[in-house]
């Protein structure tokens, strides 16, 4: 049970950042992101956020560092930008 809670506390922030990034991008760039569904944008952004977070935690060896959160946000934002550029 402890392992499940640890995994959830690791994944939920990354997925929440991905969903919030997708929602913000859909609100700000409605015309540019019309071709991409909000669900797809959230999934890709959340996955990129989780991968970036996992990579930096593996590199630093510690969870909860500001660098980890910065990489999580940057990877999420870059994935939305990549999808927007690719669809246009």
Image: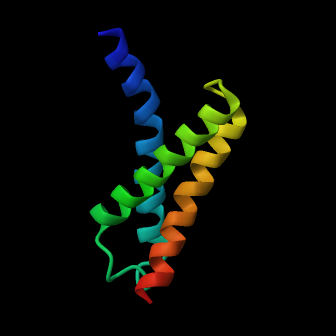
Horizontally, is 77 left or right of 9 in the view?
A: right
**Image quadrant assignment for residue 67:** top right
**x, y percentage for residue 45?**
44, 57
Horizontally, is 55 left or right of 8 in the view?
A: right
Nearer to me, 62 or 8: 62
Horizontally, is 77 left or right of 16 in the view?
A: right
> Against 84, is 64 above or below?
above
**x, y percentage for residue 66?**
71, 35
The residue depicted at 62 percent of the width and 55 percent of the height is: 74
Horizontally, is 45 left or right of 75 in the view?
A: left
Nearer to me, 35 or 71: 71
**x, y percentage for residue 77?**
56, 61
**Is the N terminus in the top left, top right, bottom left or bottom right quadrant?**
top left
The residue depicted at 48 percent of the width and 54 percent of the height is: 48
Specify the color scheme: rainbow
> Against 37, is 14 above or below?
above
**Is the C terminus in the top left, top right, bottom left or bottom right quadrant?**
bottom left
**x, y percentage for residue 60?**
69, 31
């Amino acid at each position: 049970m402890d392992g499940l809670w640890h995994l959830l506390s690791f994944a939920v922030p990354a997925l929440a950042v991905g969903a919030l990034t997708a929602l913000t991008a859909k609100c700000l760039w409605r015309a540019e992101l019309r071709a991409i569904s909000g669900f797809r944008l959230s999934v890709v952004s959340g996955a990129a956020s989780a991968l970036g977070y996992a990579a930096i935690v593996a590199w630093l060896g510690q969870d909860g560092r500001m660098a980890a959160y910065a990489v999580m946000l940057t990877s999420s934002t870059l994935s939305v930008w990549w999808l927007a550029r690719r669809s246009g």
